[in-house]
Amino acid sequence: MAFQLNDHVTYVGKIDWELRNFHGEEYSTHRGSSYNSYLVRDEKTVLIDTVWAPYAKEFVEKLKLEIDLKEIDYIVVNHGEIDHSGALPELLKEIPDTPIYCTANAVKSLKGHYHQDWNFKTVKTGDRLSLGNKELIFVEMAMMHWPDTMGCFLTGDNILFSNDVFGQHYASEVMYNDLVDEGELYQEALKYYANIITPFSKIADSKLKEIAKMNLPIQMICPSHGIIWRDNPMQIVETYAKWANNYQEDQVTILYDTMWNGTRRMAEAIAEGIRETDPAVVVKLYNMGRSDHTDVMAEVFKSKAIVVGSATVNKGILTSIAGMLEEIHGMSYKNKKAVAFGTYGWSGESVKIITERLAASGLTVIHEGLKAMWNPDDAAIEACKRMGEEVAKSL
Ligand code: FEO
């Protein structure tokens, strides 16, 4: 799909309505995604990013309908990950000597993926590439989210091409933020931040400040996934600044897995205790054996506290909870509270294992945890409610 952003800039990316999983099978993309690529024409012509490898041939064929490939003077690779660089091999078969502008780290990642010695031109923050009347100003954004990540700013049109940053996995036939459902857009933008950018929030915070100091008169933000921010584009920059600073809502998320519903009954009693203590707190429960882990990570991201439960099995915990704890460990959360619970039959290690893992992940454990033998009786359910009360009071 191609469309004009203005007289000089053409969208030449791929809208992928079919995509349901990304990063292998890791990240659910219920609303599809897009791999955004942009063609900028001035006295010189530059192609900014490409698309994921399965769409490489389609991308090159459609690009030829827009321009004679030999008229592309430069290629900018803002980030070497396959979803954006995947069409380079196909494209460079036709224009092999075209200079590729990217960071030094992107040279490493591109060579690592494709094992080609292309015509790389490395750039740093503040470097400029003249296109004639306009310039591209490069902005390194290392670890937002790969070491090679960068953006570039087109003077004159005042467009920031931000690659993954400010993106969303969201397919649409109308690619502007003022034309799509705002609730859907922000749900996908937050899920993206929560799952992709959160581990690097500290870096993101300082990078956003550094970009602000560059005083770029940003009038449009074109990410490499999803919708283009043209109506008040700084809204997503300001939202990122909030998300990067230990963002929290009045929410507690309870994640659990259960074998014979005992741990589920504990989860529900804890929720009741929270609700009765503070009705203003949003409480959400997820059986992780049945829930999408990237959706739930977005809920964890928003939460002031999480409550994590598993039955004990084979002296350990259920695999869905083990997986969630692994993801939580990688997020480097700050200022988030946590507590564990679970049922057991004879040995009962789950609460200790979960508690230790939560503490090792930097969460503040606010209670020693609660375990109930076999199916919780009335006293155990009452203890769960009291623990819920303690959680609510700790927020
Ligand atoms: Fe969309 Fe990090 O690639």
Image: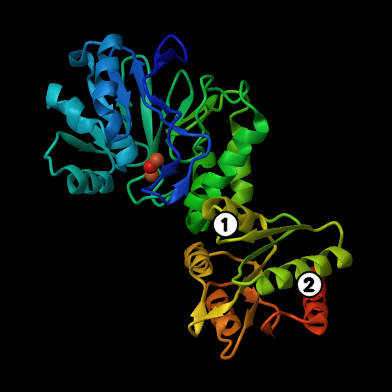
Q: Amino acid at mark 1?
A: Arg
Q: Amino acid at mark 2?
A: Gly
Q: Which callout, 1 or 2, points at the residue further toward the start of the chain?
A: 1
Image quarter where the C terminus lies is: bottom right
User: In the picture, residue 15 is in which quadrant?
Assistant: top left
Where does residue 103 sit, x and y in percent of width and height?
A: 29, 43
- Which of 352 and 379 lies nearest the eye of the viewer? 379
User: In the picture, residue 120 is in which quadrant?
Assistant: top left
Task: Reply above or below: 49 against 245.
Answer: above
Where does residue 262 sit, x and y in percent of width and height?
A: 68, 74
Q: Is residue 260 visible?
A: yes
Residue found 72% across the figure and 73% down from its top? 266
Which residue is identified by label 1?
290
Residue found 63% across the figure and 27% down from its top? 232
Where does residue 68 sit, x and y in percent of width and height?
A: 22, 11
Helix, strand, or loop for circle 1?
A: loop
